[in-house]
Amino acid sequence: MQLNRACIVTLFLSLPITTMAQSTIEEFTRLPSARDVKISPSGKFLSAVFRRDGEDLLGVLDRETREPIASFKVSGRGRAVGDVTWVNDERIVYTVTESYHWNKQRFSNGELVGVDFDGRKHRLVFGYRSGESTLNTRIKKNKANYGNQEIIDLLEGDEENILIAFYPWRLVGNMWVSDPSAQTLIYKLNVYNGKTKKVDVLPYAHASAITDHQGNVRFAVAIDDNNDTVISFRPDVSSDWQEWELQGFGADSVTPLSFTGDDQGIYVLANVGQSTQGLYLFDLQSRDFQEVVHDEQVDITMLLRDFANRHVVGVGTDLGLPKYRYLDSDDKKVKLHRMLLKAFPGQDVMITSATSDGALAIAYVYSDTNSGNYYLFETESLKATYLLSQRKWLDPEKLSPTRAMTFDTRDGETLHGYVTLPRGKEKNVPLVVFPHGGPHGVRDYWGFDWEVQLLASRGYGVLQVNFRGSGGFGLDFEKAGYGKWGSLMQDDLTDATMALVESGVADKDRICIFGHSYGGYAALMGAVREPALYRCAIGSMGVYNLPMMFEEGDIPDQASGLAYLKQALGEDQADLQRRSPAFNAGNIQAEILLIHGARDDRAPIEQAESLKSALDDAGKSYQWLEIGDEAHGYYDEDNRRAVYEKVLAFLDANIGG
């Protein structure tokens, strides 16, 4: 199927996608059937992670025939394939995740496994079990490494080794946990035999590393106990680490990204003067900064790197639909990305991998109504081939478009958000206000969201608001939420909700507020502060007792966590109580549903129990759902289905979609 540029759009839009009408909760809560599709460096093979019978299998296919060559999984209960990387044309490495019968959340266990494309030489090459056993018992054991790792450089030209950053654990009682004081180690790792060579030690604990085009670690970036970014730099590989001074730049939150092609400059993300985050180029010789891309309304949220994944060639922003700015119009990946965006109007495109010569690439295409499709694209002939969908059982034609909206607050601030309405309904719809978690540094984006689509499929409009305190709109905007949980931030949600009521979109008598984590807090504080506005409120894995946040959970375990709480919440106990649902349950008139995972360390179930007791004392009715084997999130498909069966029944009973 060859084509020219003139007919590429027609081809892409007519490619077959298997669909069927979705009618069950399970079809939305089901995990994707495939992910992480990538092509080998020569283009001979394709790899993908497929979900079969509740397990993740890594499969390798012949690119031309699509015939399967091998498939493999991680042995051991609860272990699964994580991220997948082609090191060379025959060797793959993948990370390992673990979950447990008492906690379904997946954790990275720090292990790397190497395997050939045909399934041979399958062995554990790095991790805590590498000193105890191997997948081939005839192979000599290596040193056990207790900690997490991250691949930082594939070392171009070296077919056997990669560079990894290692973050050590420490033993507390009988459990291994992250060591907040351990410096990051840099290892050269042989992906065939698991041999390691320590090549560097970064100057900070938990620092991330940036390499130049020769594979030398030249930048170390970390977050200190006060949650400030600290950066060290080496002029060359033989130099000592030195503090990276940015005199005269006037920027906060500077993050180095990648070297320029000649290693003479470094691209950085930075907020200059508390404004939105822009892309800047720092000349390592002259020490001058140059603004490259800056949007006064919104931060840069996406990075486009060249086919070799070495340096930045484009950036993207998300005010509404994603928008891109390219740095090098002649770069092959830039040309392909620009072409694919035109071929898929109204959708976003991510190029997940490409061959060494850039002749073949895998493109992931998604939108608000498209849960994600993978395509193989030949960059010279413009031949395109549909590969697979993440959720082939969801028909985009039956899902609901998500529209970017702006809202004005009572004090004159303009907020950005998204509204998703049931198909065929534009006025007087029952509304679910859906505040995001976080809340600081986190925001809502346009794109496919299975929870939003499930709610819309049942007749509910969904409102998502990037209220003050959210990330993505500059430091001033984010810091405006500090100390304003349950007050200014809550007013922003109320004002956006009232805007939809006043425009006739939302039925004022059928509004519910529902959220996870901070969103659960905002849901219950909405019921406290606006008792006449919300008919019902659903708090999921939320925090409801702000003073308790300084005592329970994993946030106050570290100095940086305590610093965050003091900054984000403040320390005035009376004020914290005024902004806590558990201390104001008597004000609630809405019907309440509380959902929580018993294993939650981020927002411990004691938070929900505190509110539950307060509701009992106030004589308020509520519904309660405790998930015994979940933590901060619902990862098991059966649990997700149970949660949403409860949520939808509760919504139907109160605001009737």
Image (tube, rainbow, N blue to C red):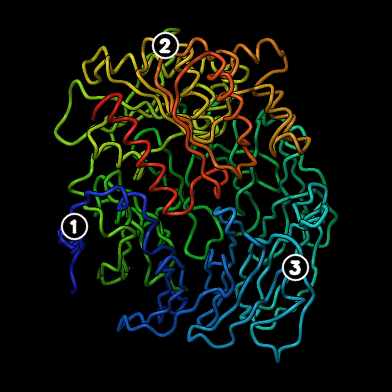
**Mark toward the start of the polypeptide (1 vs 3):** 1
In the rendered structure, the answer to whether residue 357 lies left or right of residue 145 reads left
Residue 294 seen in this snapshot: no
The label on residue 187 is 3
Residue 585 seen in this snapshot: yes
Q: Which x, y percent locates residue 98?
A: 60, 62
Query: Which residue appears at 65% of the width and 41% of the height?
Result: 601
Q: CA distance from mark 1 to mark 3?
A: 48 Å
The label on residue 531 is 2
Asked whether the residues under the numbered discs 1 and 3 touch, taking CB atoms below 8 Å apart as contact, a structural biologist would say no
Q: Is residue 506 above or below residue 595?
A: above
**Mark toward the start of the polypeptide (3 vs 2):** 3
The residue lying toward the viewer, choosing from 574 and 281, is 574
Q: Quadrant of residue 542 in the image?
A: top right
Query: Which residue appears at 65% of the width and 38% of the height?
Result: 254
Query: Which residue appears at 59% of the width and 47% of the height?
Result: 267
Q: CA distance from mark 1 to mark 2?
A: 41 Å
Q: Which residue position is annotated with label 1?
A: 20
Quick one: SS at disc 2?
loop
In front: label 1 or label 3: 1
